[in-house]
Image (tube, rainbow, N blue to C red):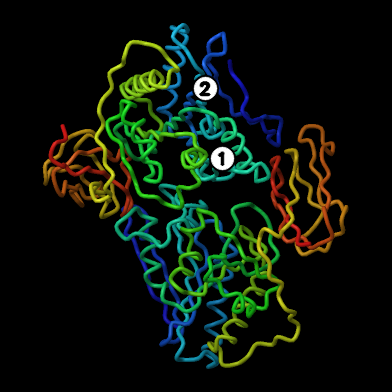
């Protein structure tokens, strides 16, 4: 493994902004893995750093193919994480809305361009992503349905679900979308958490990546697959949203991955002054809880659950 | 008359309301309508003074009103009240949520109700103030997809500059793109700087609005003379000066100034050493229509925009 400085911006008062990469093997650019792009993506940087540790170990055991190159970048944005700010410290812009970037443009456009130049030629690209709504997900692989998506490869992670997202206008400036346009097989991996560390979820995603690497011939040995079932593939529009009608204190009664029956109570919302239940939320169909809101307060009209029927 | 456009309860004993102020003649008017929208970004306040001045003039001369004027001074009331650019609590740019959806999230629901309310306007004007970093001369920005319909209107708005820019998929989620796509001509004004009011610009745009209202038969008055703006639709006409290093930026020229090639536009300073790290100069003759106001720059921060001189501009 080689630790490499991939991109840097000198700063007047802070330490320099640095993006570090960990490169394994050499030769065919087989896989690039990107961790956190936003300052609150703690689970993403944690998972990525654990992946680096695991790959180091595998490399030491001689289990990585020498003629395949893997690049892992745990953080594209240490400057924001170090001050606990989600977006770019000075102008609040989102690096994951700047791809493919512009090397003569604004700061985050330059960061996106500088990184993308180094990661656009990999055959496969994985990003540990986070959702814009606060909540927990059932771990899954997500891909943009851009016409370039490779569903068969996505199955190789052996995660329970593969979700195809119909791109919205703002998606066109994300890393995942641009990777696909540049003919990289791009996958976003979602674990259950973002701003807390979930060890189990991290392990599940790392195992998924190792299975994928084995299927791509990057690992010399296969990973044990005996307990895996065939992933379910669906588009995000197939998820049933359960929405709050009122605002208040949110009491969640259902967990991610829990199987629920039609009519089962999933949550209640309490009046913040008098503590009385103002709304009860029920499952509209039999299914599995795929996404659950995770904040103590809720606004009206929020999709607090997404069920997979 | 102040009307509620959308009202949503917040978790703890508070109602989020987007309101508008409607002015129309006692007889209901001729059915023509202009909507003036501002405050989508909570840190852009120049439109506050414009709304105030439009309302004030209508109050002073109600007999001149022929149609309906709707003023929406606070599209993002929580943002304005908390000095936050986006929608607080969501860290979300409201101008990336349109056209929204009634079955969407909280923010998409707000966006959808606003769009619904604006439909039917003969003209919508969305007033912005750049951001807290940059000062702009009064200008109207137009997506090239809508140039045919919008440029003639923009020419009547008393601004200094009309900038027709390339289509960008990300901008499809702006209010202006949504309204223009729905057939409501919508002009995006950028002027002044965030967190401040500029009296001269408010006066200038107010005149432009009343002139346009005259053209649309919403207001009857003596003809108001307006400026003929510079129009640019060629992206290669605009020079961007980005900070080549991080440091403290000090402007040496003001927005609106004519520049000669080699003129010093600004400098980047190092307060530790007393040295100038970089001098930013005009690469050719042109008109400085954007200049950085906020001193701290990272490498890449936008410092200035210059429109290249092209022959007959005054």
Q: Position of residue A35 (x, y in %)?
A: 52, 67
Residue beneath the point at 47% across and 42% down: B177
Q: Quadrant of the C terminus of chain A?
A: bottom right
Q: Residue at x 41, y 51 (%)?
A: B168
Q: Residues within 10 Å of mark 2 (few under 14, many from 20)?
A: many
Q: Kindly state the secondary structure of the residue where label 2 is placed.
A: strand
State whether residue B269 appears in this view.
no
Height in image: A127 above or below A97?
Answer: below
Q: Which mark is on residue A43? A: none
Q: Residue at x 71, y 34 (%)?
A: B12
Q: Is residue A282 above or below residue A260?
A: above
Chain where mark 2 sits: B
Marks counted in the figure total 2
Q: Nearer the viewer, mark 2 or mark 1?
A: 2
Determine the residue positioned at 45% across, 47% down. Answer: B171
Is A145 left or right of B160, judged from the image as shown?
A: right
**Of the pair B212 and A181, the residue shown nearer to us:** B212
Distance (Cα) linking label 2 and label 1: 25 Å
B248 vs B98, nearest the viewer: B98
Residue B29: % across, % down? 53, 14
Q: Can residue A47 be seen in this snapshot?
A: yes
Name which of mark 2 and mark 1 comes first in the sequence.
2
Instruction: State if disc 1 and disc 2 touch (CB < 8 Å).
Output: no
Disc 1 element: loop
Q: Is residue A132 left or right of residue B199?
A: right
Disc 1 crowd, CA 10 A, few/some/many (<14, 14-19, 20+): some
Instruction: State the image coordinates of residue A50 (x, y, percent, origin top left).
Output: 57, 74
Residue B199 falls in image quadrant? top left
Chain for disc number 1:
B
Looking at the rendered structure, whether the residues under marks 2 and 1 are on a common chain is answered as yes
The residue under label 2 is B70
According to the image, label 1 marks what residue? Answer: B88
């Amino acid at each position: 493994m080689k630790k490499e400085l991939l991109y840097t911006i000198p700063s007047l008062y802070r330490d320099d902004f640095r993006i570090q990469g960990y490169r394994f093997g050499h030769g065919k650019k087989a896989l690039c893995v990107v961790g956190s792009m936003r300052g609150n993506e703690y689970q993403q940087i944690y998972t990525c750093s654990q992946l680096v540790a695991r790959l180091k170990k595998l490399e030491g055991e001689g289990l990585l193919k020498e003629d395949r190159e893997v690049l892992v970048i745990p953080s594209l944005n240490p400057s924001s994480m170090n001050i606990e700010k989600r977006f770019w410290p000075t102008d609040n812009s989102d690096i994951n809305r700047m791809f493919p970037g512009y090397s003569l443009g604004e700061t985050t456009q330059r960061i996106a361009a500088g990184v993308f130049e180094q990661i656009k030629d990999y055959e496969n690209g994985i990003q540990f992503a986070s959702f814009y709504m606060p909540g927990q997900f059932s771990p899954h692989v997500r891909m943009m349905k851009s016409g370039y998506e490779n569903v068969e490869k996505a199955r190789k992670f052996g995660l329970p679900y593969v979700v195809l997202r119909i791109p919205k206008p703002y998606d066109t400036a994300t890393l995942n979308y641009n990777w696909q346009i540049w003919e990289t097989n791009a996958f976003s991996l979602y674990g259950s958490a973002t701003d807390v560390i979930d060890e189990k979820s991290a392990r599940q995603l790392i195992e998924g990546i190792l299975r994928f690497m084995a299927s791509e011939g990057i690992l010399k040995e296969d990973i044990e697959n005996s307990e895996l079932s065939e992933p379910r593939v669906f588009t995000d529009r197939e998820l049933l949203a359960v929405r709050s009608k009122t605002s208040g204190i949110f009491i969640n009664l259902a967990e991610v991955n829990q199987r629920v029956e039609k009519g089962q109570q999933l949550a209640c919302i309490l009046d913040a002054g008098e503590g009385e239940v103002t709304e009860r939320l029920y499952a509209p169909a039999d299914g599995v809880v795929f996404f659950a809101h995770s904040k103590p307060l809720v606004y009206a009209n929020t999709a607090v659950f997404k069920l997979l029927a | 008359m102040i009307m509620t456009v959308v009202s949503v309860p917040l978790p703890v004993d508070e109602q989020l309301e987007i309101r508008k102020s409607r002015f129309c003649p006692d007889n209901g008017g001729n059915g023509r309508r202009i909507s003036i929208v501002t405050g989508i970004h909570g840190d852009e306040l120049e439109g506050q003074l414009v709304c105030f001045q439009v309302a004030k003039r209508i109050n002073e001369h109600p007999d001149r009103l022929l149609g309906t004027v709707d003023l929406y001074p606070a599209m993002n009331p929580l943002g304005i009240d908390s000095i936050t650019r986006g929608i607080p609590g969501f860290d979300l740019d409201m101008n990336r949520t349109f056209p929204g959806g009634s079955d969407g999230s909280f923010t998409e629901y707000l966006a959808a109700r606003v769009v619904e309310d604006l439909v039917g306007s003969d003209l919508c004007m969305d007033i912005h103030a750049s951001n807290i970093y940059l000062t702009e001369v009064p200008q109207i920005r137009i997506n090239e997809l809508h140039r045919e319909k919008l440029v003639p209107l923009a020419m009547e708005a008393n601004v200094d500059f009309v900038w027709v820019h390339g289509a960008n998929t990300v901008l499809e989620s702006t209010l202006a793109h949504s309204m223009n796509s729905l057939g409501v001509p919508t002009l995006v004004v950028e002027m002044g700087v965030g967190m401040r009011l500029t009296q001269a610009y408010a006066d200038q745009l107010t005149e432009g609005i009343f002139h346009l209202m005259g053209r649309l038969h919403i207001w009857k008055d003596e003809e108001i003379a307006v400026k003929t703006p510079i129009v640019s639709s060629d992206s290669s006409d605009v020079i961007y000066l980005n900070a080549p290093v991080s440091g403290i930026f000090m402007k040496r020229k003001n927005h609106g100034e004519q520049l000669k090639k080699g003129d010093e536009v600004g400098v980047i300073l190092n307060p530790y050493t007393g040295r100038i790290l970089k001098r930013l100069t005009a690469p050719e003759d042109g008109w400085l229509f954007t200049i950085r106001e906020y001193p701290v720059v990272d490498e890449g921060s936008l410092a200035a925009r210059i429109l290249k001189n092209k022959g007959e501009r005054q």
